[in-house]
C-alpha cells in the first residue's frame, strides 16, 4: 500500500512539473484577448511585434527583447477604424517621454494596417507609444525590456515546479524519518 502511495505521489509531481503550462515562454497561438502584445482601448486594438533577424531570423518578440542591436518594430492596426485615421509611433529610452527619442514614425494613414520602424536598442528599458489621432486621441503604451531579466516573471514561471519539488522532498523526508522506507526496501530484498 505504501509503495503504491509513494509511486502515485511521485508520478503526480512529475506530471505536474511536465504539464505546467507557464514553462512555455513564447506567446504562440493565443487568442487576441490573452495576447500580451495586444493593447486595447474601447473597440480599437493594436498588436506589437519586434524582430531581430541578425540574431534569429524566425524569432519575434513582444516586450522582452533578448539582445541589444538593430530592432524592427511592427505595429499591426487590428481594427479597420484605426486604418482610416492618422497613426504614429514613438520609441523613447527609459520611461514614457522622459528619455531620448530613438524611433519616430510620423502620424499618417496606414491603409495596409502596418506601421514599422527600425532603430538600435541598447540594453535597458524603452517606451513605445502608438498614437491614433482620433477624437479623442488614442495612446497605446508598451514598455520594452532589452537584454534584461524579469525576475518576477521568472519566479512566477518556476514557482509551480519548485513547490512540487519541495513537496516531493518533504514526502521523501517523512518516509525516511518514519522508517517505512527502510522496511519497504528490506521487504523487496527478501
Image: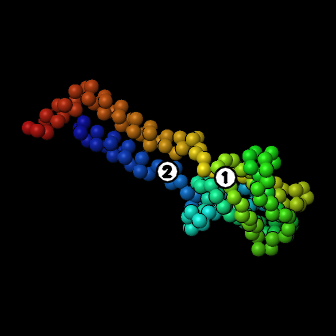
Name the residue tied to disc 1: 122
> Quick check: marks 1 and 2 in contact, CB under 8 Å?
no
Q: What element carries label 1?
A: loop
- Quadrant placement of the N terminus: top left
The quarter holding residue 13 reads top left
- Quadrant placement of the C terminus: top left
Q: How crowded is mark 1: few (under 14 residues within 10 Å), some or many (20 or more)?
A: some
Q: What element carries label 2?
A: helix
Residue 17 location (% of width, % of height): 42, 47
In this orientation, which residue lies closer to the viewer: 32 or 73?
Answer: 73
- Residue 47 visible to an observer of this rendering: no
On screen, residue 36 versus residue 112, left or right, reads left
Residue 120 location (% of width, % of height): 69, 58
Residue at the extreme bottom of the image, as rendered: 112
- Residue 63 visible to an observer of this rendering: yes
- Residue visible at 57% across and 68% down? 57
Eyeballing the image, is 24 above or below 105? above
- Disc 1 from disc 2: Cα separation: 27 Å
Residue at the extreme left of the image, as rendered: 190
In this orientation, which residue lies closer to the viewer: 105 or 155?
Answer: 105
Name the residue tied to disc 2: 23
Amino acid at each position: 500500500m505504501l509503495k503504491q502511495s509513494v509511486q502515485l505521489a511521485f508520478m503526480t509531481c512529475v506530471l505536474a512539473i511536465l504539464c505546467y503550462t507557464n514553462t512555455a515562454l513564447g506567446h504562440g497561438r493565443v487568442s487576441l484577448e490573452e495576447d500580451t502584445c495586444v493593447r486595447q482601448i474601447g473597440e480599437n486594438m493594436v498588436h506589437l511585434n519586434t524582430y531581430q533577424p541578425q540574431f534569429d531570423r524566425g524569432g519575434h518578440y513582444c516586450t522582452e527583447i533578448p539582445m541589444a542591436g538593430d530592432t524592427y518594430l511592427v505595429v499591426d492596426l487590428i481594427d479597420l477604424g484605426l486604418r482610416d485615421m492618422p497613426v504614429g509611433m514613438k520609441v523613447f529610452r527609459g520611461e514614457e517621454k522622459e528619455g531620448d527619442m530613438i524611433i519616430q514614425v510620423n502620424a499618417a494613414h496606414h491603409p495596409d494596417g502596418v506601421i514599422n520602424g527600425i532603430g538600435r536598442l541598447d540594453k535597458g528599458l524603452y517606451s513605445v507609444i502608438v498614437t491614433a489621432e482620433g477624437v479623442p486621441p488614442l495612446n497605446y503604451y508598451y514598455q520594452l525590456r532589452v537584454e534584461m531579466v524579469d525576475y518576477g516573471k521568472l519566479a512566477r514561471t518556476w514557482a509551480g515546479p519548485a513547490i512540487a519539488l519541495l513537496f516531493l522532498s518533504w514526502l521523501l523526508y517523512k518516509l525516511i524519518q518514519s522508517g517505512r522506507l527502510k522496511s519497504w526496501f528490506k521487504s523487496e530484498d527478501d
